Image: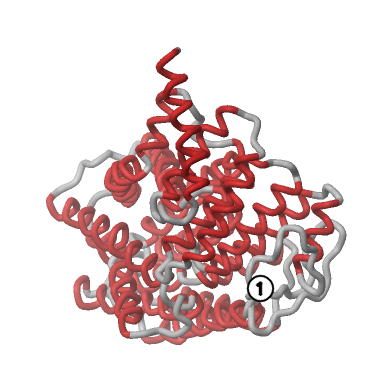
Amino acid sequence: MRTKLDAISITAVLVTVGAFSATAPLTAFATGSALALALGRNALGLLTLGPVVALIRRREFRKVFRGERFLVRKEQRRGALLGALAGTALAAHFATFMSSTRMTSVAMATALVATQPVWQALISTLQGHRLPRATWAGLGISVAGAAIASGMDGRAGTDAVVGDAVVGDALALAGAIALAGYTAISEQARPDVSTMVYSVLCSSVCTVELLILCLVTGTPLFAFNGSTWLALLGLLIFPQLLGLFSLNFVLGRAPATAVSILLLLEAPVAALIAWLWLGQLPSATAWPGLLMIMLGVTAVVVADARRADPATDTVTDMDTTGEIRGLVAFPQHPLLALNHIPGGDIHAFLWREAHRGRFRAVEATIRRLENEAVRIHGAKSTEATHWIEVRAVVARIAADHALSARLWLTAARFHSSSARRDLPSTRTCLDHAYQEWCGLTDEDAIDELASALREMCRQDPYYSTEMLAVLDKRLLHKIVHSHQE
């Protein structure tokens, strides 16, 4: 992944900002219910994404329908449960934020929702993490700015009364908190579930819960006029499809911190769109508060990036439960040999605790480090993939050869599909996956992983003819045995 923003990355960020900035103005423009719009946006997005996932994962779905495997594997159940909870938080975000655009100005709603990193920092403290002073300073500036802007905003250009505007501001803040909750839950769930499956799961839960909310509140479903249908189509095309696609693209090329800061442009761009299109503009006395919100959020984002900078962090202290009380270094060295117990870094602690059988503490530590690597470098980066490899080693120590093989295969796929394909690392991971496969005794797991290994080997057919011969023999045995039955 690139460490600086290039022209392509900047263009992608600007497209993302423009697409996301259209959310609040489009919602304010539509005359239909905000809840119904939120439901329609997610339902259409799910209908668009669902068939794509079904096509990409068609082999897995075939096995599910044949009864050869469950839809969610055992090791994915925790991630799936957390994904359902994240879908609930996402539904709360859409319901509150989109409703707020009808009660307060677009500029206020977007700026208050942009305080999500601030609430994310507070959630981090509740999880036991210590925050630097700069983060607390940014938090204080943002809260003060929100109070000033909410109190001074005259809602110029709108007909909303002051009482409705205050409720709208509160809903926008609730939307920011719900979005922070979604991010925090997703951080814990994402290492266990693929991006496609996780997106469909969250969207499904979110859509169902918004439907229930509409039915409970008596909100008319899709009773839209022509302008509202156009707004709904815009919500689907811009933030739901174009925005998410360009964001995922740029996160694979540029530093997450730089992207996060540039995304703060969403608030002023949304305010500009609302002014030019809807005639909405906060009063002059509200602008200092809006500026304080942006400055405070920027301070939080930058402080968080410095706290997690792999170039400066070191391992300082860990207790016996696996909780990391200090800063943690992200290892940049190649994967350590399986039979070697390293010293002087985080791996020494992981190997020691794994050999002592404290796998829950080890998994919690690895998950935290993996989440940080995903957030900073990207889901398929070398840094994030390294922690998948570490989890595979721990699974081997736990004598869970099936899980270890699956993790090695996942790491191999990431190495082979990255922008700079790493053929040596891919082959190393395939070797380890094959070794774990040879140690399996469960016939179903042997057959399932043989197919997956053979599929990966097709990308490099001249690598290990011996491995291919063994896998082909096993698959042929499976076919003959199925015909005999």
Q: Residue at x 50, y 35 (%)?
A: 448
Residue 239 visible in this rendered orientation of the protein: yes
Pointer 1 residue? 330
Residue at 54% across / 42% down in the picture?
A: 80
Query: Looking at this view, is 364 or 223 the one in front?
Result: 364
Task: Out of 92 and 395, give the one closest to the viewer.
Answer: 395
Residue 417, image x and y in percent? 41, 61
Query: Could you say which is closer to the camera, residue 167 or residue 390?
Result: 390
Report the coloring of the rendering. secondary structure
The residue sitting at 43% across, 40% down in the picture is 209
Which quarter of the figure has residue 123?
bottom right
Estimate the x, y position of residue 81 in percent, counting from the top left: 57, 41
Q: Position of residue 110 (x, y in %)?
A: 39, 70
Q: Is residue 281 left or right of residue 469?
A: left
- Label 1 sits on what residue type? Phe
- Residue 8 location in percent, x, y? 31, 80
Residue nearest the viewer, comparing 180 with 144 = 180
Badge 1 element: loop
